[in-house]
Image (cartoon, rainbow, N blue to C red):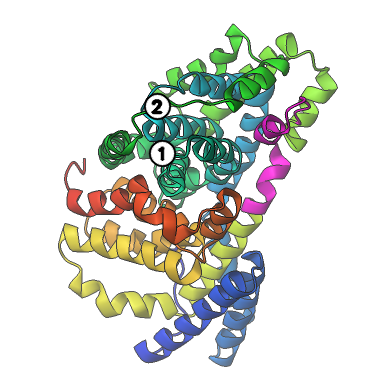
Amino acid sequence: MFPINPKHNPSLVESVIFFIITIGLISYFIISLGTSPHIPILIAIFLLVLYGLLKGISFKDLEEGMTAGAKSGMGAIFLFLLIGVLISSWMISGTIPALINTGFSLIGGTWFYAVVFAVTALAGVSLGSSLTTTATIGVAFIGMAGAMDASMAISAGAIVSGAFFGDKMSPLSDTTNLASTIVQVDLFDHIKHMSLTTIPAFIISLTLFGILSPDEAASIQNLASYKSALAETGLIHWTSWIPLIILVAITFFKIPAFISLAISSLAATLLAGATSGLTWTDIWTTWFNGYTAATNFEPVNSLLTRGGINSMLFTVSLVILALGFGGLLFVTGIIPTLLSSFKDKLKSVRSIIISTAATAIGVNVFIGEQYLSIMLTGETYKGLYKNTELPNKVLSRTLEDAGTVINPLVPWSVCGVFIADVLGVPVLTYLPFAFFCLLSPIITIIFGGKALR
């Protein structure tokens, strides 16, 4: 947990009541008022500071608690900023457009839902963002499903499953980097260990979508427009694959994620200078502002206009606030009291993993925020995993299996509200068919403590 010593020892009842009030406040602002999560978290920080002062904790100790909490996420923050650079450099080098174009080339035949899941997963890995994948490729697929008279619920379930597979497994994903950094696990070791539960969930989901797919061949008219617009960008070349190859090759040498992403970003930027037709001023500008596409096909413009350091500032500011909030929960003694009340009951590996998964799911349900699910659960259980000599990679895997992929299944969550709006399919309608999201926590619980080393 946070390296913070509590300055107060509240009773269990007091801790539970204050925790529920605080979480309820955050939930109300996010769910009922639809505000950015930054606002209620900041208000919750105000309340915790007031609570601490009333309990005789000096402001200096409270401030140090907030600072220590935020400091624990600095590794993730630097990675987030670099990911913004990587995404923009991969755009202008044609790497992400080439990956998306390859995915579209797989469309066709009778396995529509399975192909939607697979292609969306490929795009999700390349983009590293579930919501961007859903709002671009997902919208295209839901339109294709309507034209084919296919099930909108199953199509949406396939889109969500694929998008969150990508969000979970992509080295570009902020949640993937956050989960690994919070519990101090190397990014690529984290992704490798997640494959133990993610690959079975992917295979089962792909099989189910294949079984449910309609018999008639898919007739997709928009596909040509997407591929034509991607070609119109002039970004796709044979060299577009080099940054991806470099990144994959580097992973075999277990080079730290920051260095790996930096090398791939620089390689992509240099290649873009030779192939993109952009001036060097424009190329370096994309590092901060991201790439802006200007084709004659607006869906592709929306798909490719992203990246840059500026795009990550929302996430960075949320991480700082949430970790500061977590630091206050520890320095005021609220979280330590809650943990001590049940930690003696968590002795077996399976009970610890089940409790971790339940906590991550609970935060998603009560707060509706993906980042807080990962951060609060990770910080809460780090100490317990250390005391029981469970590897941190088991904790980071469980955070993703029960934290990252559950958010789109909660109707009032940030992801759930967004996806239902852009796809036009209510959360409870697609929920039974979001197989990957449903299977991930189940498999991680069944998997238990196997293959820990």
Whole-percent x and y of residue 229?
69, 21
Whole-percent x and y of residue 168?
43, 42
Classify residue 197 as left or right of residue 142. Answer: left
Classify residue 296 as left or right of residue 3. Answer: right
Whole-percent x and y of residue 261?
55, 29
Q: Quadrant of residue 235?
A: top right
Residue at x 50%, y 25% (from the top left corner): 219
Q: Which mark is residue 186?
A: 1
Q: Quadrant of residue 203?
A: top left
Q: Say which label, 1 or 2, has the lower sequence index.
A: 1
Whole-percent x and y of residue 1?
40, 63
The residue that label 2 is drawn on is 254
Q: Quadrant of residue 340?
A: bottom left
Q: Which residues are magenta?
A: 292-315
Classify residue 356 as left or right of residue 408. Answer: left
Hey, what amino acid is under mark 2? Lys
Q: Is residue 167 above or below residue 317?
A: above
Classify residue 390 as left or right of residue 113. Answer: left
